[in-house]
Image (spheres, rainbow, N blue to C red):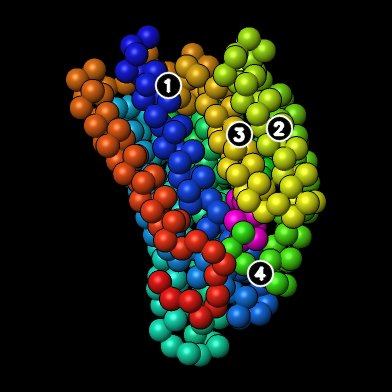
């Protein structure tokens, strides 16, 4: 295997993990805002994430652009298979962004309530669709010989992928509640702590169900898994992170819960990548038709040039996030401006 192919496989999951970790908590807080009755509390939740939300989609854009150049066949298959889900995802992100910018333009309960609903629903749809798409990739897409996709939109709405969407929704919501508990105080903080203490149980139950379901739906993902040191290490780290969430949520150690949540998300996506390797997209019709690293990549020259994008862009994005986080330390108030 060409080292560049392996490097890009790792980079794609790093990009997805970067998006999930850096944008996941504000998506989760958007979902929580749907169930927050008091306007003042919704204002606080939204102001907590205002400094962070608008730059994190760069991770997804980078992954998509790089995929087009380095694995064009994979890009074509995903574009065909997920045309409708990607369109829904894009619409949800647009509605979310517009709602964030317009909600404060008029001091009207109807106006703000409408855009708050748009922001919450946009967050919910985004988290669900991301999980739906990843679960379908893990399960395998109906790819015929020659790299031809033969499925339909409704074939994507199978029980396995729907369960994956719900797991994604719960996980990001838990993550958002942990971050919100760090940045708020009083009754709202206590409410968010309750979200964390309840949702981690739901997340674990769903993850176990997803794992057991995978044994029947996509058994090939577990081939040689006991000898896979990467998977085994991530699995142990995942269990530790769940233990930390359990203990820290009971002890009201909000920062510990948040960091443990980021580790849990990283491990879940990392384990998915370890199970897929060396396949990129398995075929549910015949594993011989799967798209794999060694035969479905671009020329080495293209892959070398494209390395400049993530190697320069990712550190800049992380530094930007750290600077923003440093500038908005402390608790957030409803009247706070940025």
165 displayed left or right of 196: left
> Which residue matches tag 4?
185
Q: Alpha carbon of mark 2 to alpha carbon of mark 3: how far?
A: 13 Å
The residue that mark 2 highlights is 240
Marks 4/3: CA distance? 30 Å
Residue found at x 66% / y 69%: 185
**Is residue 178 on the magenta stretch?**
yes
What kind of element bears circle 3? helix
Residue at the disc numbered 1: 291
Q: Secondary structure at mark 4?
A: loop
Q: Which residues are magenta?
A: 172-181
Q: Quadrant of the N terminus?
A: top left
Nearer the N terminus, badge 1 or badge 4? Answer: 4
Mark 2 or mark 3, whichever is nearer to me: 2
Tell me, yes or no, whether the two marked residues, 3 and 1, touch with CB atoms within 8 Å. Answer: no
- State which quadrant residue 135 falls in: top right
Check if residue 164 falls in the magenta segment.
no
> What residue does disc 3 label?
268
């Amino acid at each position: 295997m060409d080292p560049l192919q392996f490097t890009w496989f790792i980079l794609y999951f790093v990009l997805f993990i970067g998006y999930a970790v850096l944008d996941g908590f504000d998506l989760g807080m958007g979902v929580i805002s749907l169930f927050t009755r008091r306007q003042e509390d919704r204002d606080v939740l939204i102001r907590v994430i205002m400094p962070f939300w608008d730059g994190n989609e760069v991770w997804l854009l980078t992954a998509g652009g790089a995929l087009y150049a380095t694995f064009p066949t994979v890009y074509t298959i995903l574009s065909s298979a997920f045309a409708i889900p990607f369109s829904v995802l894009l619409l949800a992100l647009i509605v979310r962004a517009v709602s964030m910018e317009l909600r404060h333009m008029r001091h009207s309960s109807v106006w703000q309530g409408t855009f708050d609903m748009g922001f919450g629903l946009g967050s919910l749809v985004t988290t669900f669709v991301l999980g739906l798409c990843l679960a379908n990739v893990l399960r395998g897409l109906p790819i015929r010989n020659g790299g031809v996709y033969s499925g339909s939109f409704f074939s994507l709405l199978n029980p396995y992928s729907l369960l994956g969407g719900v797991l994604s929704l719960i996980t990001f919501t838990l993550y958002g509640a942990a971050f919100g508990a760090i940045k708020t105080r009083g009754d709202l903080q206590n409410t968010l702590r309750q979200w964390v203490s309840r949702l981690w149980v739901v997340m674990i139950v769903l993850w176990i169900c997803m794992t057991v379901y995978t044994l029947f739906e996509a058994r090939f993902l577990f081939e040689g898994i006991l000898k896979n040191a990467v998977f085994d290490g991530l699995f142990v780290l995942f269990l530790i992170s769940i233990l930390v969430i359990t203990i820290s949520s009971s002890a009201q150690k909000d920062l510990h819960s948040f960091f443990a949540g980021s580790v849990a998300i990283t491990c879940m996506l990392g384990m998915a990548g370890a199970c897929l390797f060396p396949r990129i997209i398995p075929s549910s019709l015949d594993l011989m038709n799967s798209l794999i690293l060694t035969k479905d990549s671009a020329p080495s020259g293209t892959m070398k040039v494209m390395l400049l994008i993530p190697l320069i862009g990712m550190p800049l994005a992380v530094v930007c996030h750290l600077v923003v986080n440093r500038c908005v330390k402390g608790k957030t108030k409803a009247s706070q401006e940025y």
